[in-house]
Image: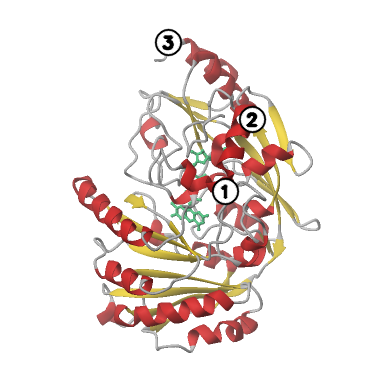
Amino acid sequence: MSGEKWVERLRGAVQGQLLLPEDQGYDTARQVWNAMIDRRPAAILHCVCADDVVVAVKTAVAYGLAVSVRGGGHNVAGTAVSDGGLMIDLSSLRSVQVDAKRQRAWVEGGATLRDLDAATQAQGLATPGGVVSSTGVAGLTLGGGFGWLSRLHGLTSDNLLSVELVLADGSQVRASAEDHSDLFWGLRGGSGNFGIATKFEFALHPIGPEILFGPTVYPLEDAPAVLRHYEAFALEAPRSCCVWANLMTAPPLPFLPEEFHGSKVLTLMQCCAGDPEEGRRLLAPLRKFSTPLGDAVMPRPYTEAQSILDAAYDKGARNYWRSHNFLRLEDPLPDTLCELAADLPTPESDILISQLGGAIADRAPGDSAYPHRQTNFAITPGVRWRDPAEDEARIAWLRTASDALAAQAEAGSYVNFISEREGRAQEAYGANYGRLTALKAEYDPENLFRCNQNVVPA
Ligand SMILES: Cc1cc2nc3c(=O)[nH]c(=O)nc-3n(C[C@H](O)[C@H](O)[C@H](O)COP(=O)(O)OP(=O)(O)OC[C@H]3O[C@@H](n4cnc5c(N)ncnc54)[C@H](O)[C@@H]3O)c2cc1C
């Protein structure tokens, strides 16, 4: 491999490190968040500047190399890495610059949410992100992106102001509402199909430093009734409130009575983005229903809220997910969910209900490539396990659970929550798929960027 012409060309032209299979560090560098992914790229380029990305793209085109792009490495389908291709790794490009006065942040293409939140919170600001801090800003934003602040301020991609991008021909462009506005439309939900983002510009909002945040936990036998009450609250909730429900196995948390550790429970993770005292008032209607086993809702730093789930979803487990969109949690769904929860196959598995709506729904489905504007709840059953020998059984369980939920769901699925690497584009992009294929034909006609939920050029 080291004698190959493309290797020599890359080595001679980039500042970043090029790792080949025989090199030390290669095996660590090809690992991503989901331990099921075990692919072996021909080479991994750790880019340290945008010019490295340009050289990588031009070399890949010249030598017919398949390309995959790594931001935070969190994609559950492992699209950051492909067998035999060139893995263009941006994880060393993580700087974040903040202009507090203009409430803007400029974020490099390999930054994580932790990098972004640390820099923006230092100025009392934030933009909506996801709920686990090691997630990459790039993949999350390009697929849409939602978290605790999205009901108040929209998707992460709704807060995107511009993107600096390396296109499939190696040219560099800036896409925004004014420049390449068609491309900018596609970048907000169309995933990594159109180029490699080296820098994102976001709008910021005053948040914190403390917000009201934390879980209440209920026994599984109370969960159907609590879920019905949760739905009623969620559909009328003020936008500053965002509550995600999770059916799971109780970890040994200090605020839970010991006899419930290891039992199946429903958790309501509650967030109110404004003043904590006001948060107590706004969340009161949710909290007065049923008596929880434990309650850890309290004023906490926003950055703590953003990382509270990190340990539960750490790197290294084998993972398989499916996600379904819902307008309501109507009967018989609460019972279906609780029956599935009673049968969760491993202690790390769960069924996560993300509350959406609010500002996300202010925009029309065609406003950007992210189509699921009307979804009020995304329900994502996920299995997590450690032993490869269990792969078949775990995946089979998840597919059966997913089929039971699909029977009651709306059409469509969030592109960032899909475990299959191929064949889900229509489901992910919905009515926007046709426009995306035309855009793809213009910006990436040879489909260089195809290691993703792929949009096929028209
Ligand atoms: C534990 C966990 C929690 C999550 N929580 C949330 C959540 O709360 N909200 C939410 O919306 N999503 C969430 N996600 C899903 C997350 O948005 C996706 O997994 C997303 O793909 C992660 O982006 P990444 O950069 O880390 O991924 P990577 O695996 O590095 O990349 C995924 C794909 O994104 C594209 N890509 C990455 N970087 C670039 C770049 N610089 N330029 C162009 N394309 C690029 C490529 O196509 C790549 O294949 C979560 C995922 C995990 C594993």
Describe the colour scheme in one phrase. Answer: secondary structure
**Would residue 249 be visible to someone looking at this image?**
no
In this view of the protein, which residue sits in the foreground, 287 or 251? 287
Q: In this view of the protein, can residue 442 be seen by the observer? A: yes
Write the residue at 64% across / 28% down: 442
How many labels, in total? Answer: 3
Residue 168 screen position, x and y as percent: 60, 25
Whether label 1 lies within 8 Å of ligand 1 gets the answer: yes
Q: Report which residue position mark 3 lands on.
A: 3
Crowd band around label 3 with a 10 angstrom C-alpha radius: few (<14), some (14–19), many (20+):
few
Q: Secondary structure at mark 2?
A: strand
- In the rendered view, does 130 fall on the left or right side of 361? left
Q: Name the residue beneath numbered marker 1.
A: 137
Q: Quadrant of the C terminus?
A: top right
Q: Amino acid at mark 2?
A: Val
Residue at 39% from the left image edge and 78% from the top image edge = 217
From the viewer's perspective, is residue 337 above or below residue 258? above
* N-term mark: 1 or 2: 1
Between discs 2 and 3, the one toward the N terminus: 3
Q: Mark 2 or mark 3: which is in front? A: 2
Q: Which residue is mark 2?
A: 166
Q: Nearer the viewer, mark 1 or mark 3?
A: 1
Relative to residue 284, is residue 391 depicted above or below?
above
Q: x%, y% of residue 248?
A: 33, 68
Q: Secondary structure at mark 3?
A: loop
Q: Nearer the viewer, residue 342 or 390?
A: 342
Q: Residue at x 38, y 37 (%)?
A: 28
Compared across the picture, whether 103 is left or right of 35 comes to: right
Task: Inspect the image, locate mark 3, and give the three-letter code of the amino acid beneath it.
Answer: Gly
Indicate the quadrant where residue 264 lies.
bottom left
Q: Quadrant of residue 212?
A: bottom right
Q: Amino acid at mark 1?
A: Val
